[in-house]
Amino acid sequence: MSTASERKCLPTFADILDELTIVQIKQVMLPEGKASFITRLDSLSHDLDLLIKEHDIKLSSKLIRIIVVLAQMNLHIWHNKEKLHANEPEYDRHLKLAHQLNGIRNQMKNLLLEEVGEATHAARRSNFSTDGLTGWDVEIK
């Protein structure tokens, strides 16, 4: 039997927040799945609230900026994947951009892990290279 204090998802705070931004995008972009997205958002929100309390996470401008960039990267990746599938001659360019944007996304997830004290070696994302990406400079202090 599940209680309100039990997590419904086991990933890190960063992974749960990342999925929350993705599901939020899906809720807008794929309205036919709205009911299932709402259910998943409720579960993710539940676990985020538990982790915020457990880790005594304080809201800061740095945390907000990391979350905003994470959401932006997920939306840009979404739109880039649409272009990737719609434009065969530009497939390689869009695929490379998707990998580069994913590098920024993973950098943000690593920053989130540090912010909430979950930055173990096993939890950190190692694929954070942007390999020649220009014009996407993100600096968060």
Image: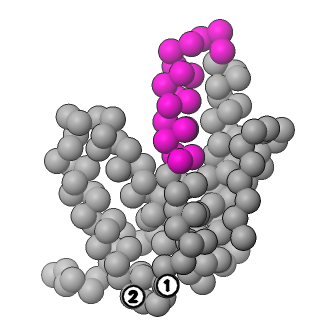
Instruction: Determine whether, in the image, residue 33 is placed left or right of residue 116.
Output: left
User: Magenta-highlighted stretch: main secondary structure?
Assistant: helix
On screen, residue 14 above or below 22: below
Q: Considering only vertical position in the picture, is 53 above or below 103?
A: below
Identify the secondary structure beneath mark 2: helix
Task: Tell whether 103 sits left or right of 61.
Answer: right
Q: Residue furthest front?
A: 61
Q: Position of residue 97 (x, y in %)?
A: 68, 33
Q: Which numbered circle lies on residue 94?
A: none
For the N terminus, which image quadrant?
bottom left
Mark 1 Cα within 10 Å, few/some/many (few <14, many 20+)? few
The first of marks 2 and 1 along the sequence is 2
Q: Is residue 73 magenta?
A: yes
Which quarter of the picture shows residue 135? top right
Q: Which residues are magenta?
A: 72-90
**x and y, in percent, of residue 80 in the image:** 56, 30
- Judging from the image, what secondary structure is the residue with disc 1 in? loop
Which residue is identified by label 2?
A: 53
Q: Amino acid at mark 1?
A: Lys
The structure residue drawn at horizontal position 54% and vertical position 77%, both measured from the top left corner, is 60
Residue occupying the point 69% across, 21% down:
92
Please, is residue 5 above or below residue 87 in the view?
Answer: below
Label number found at residue 58? 1
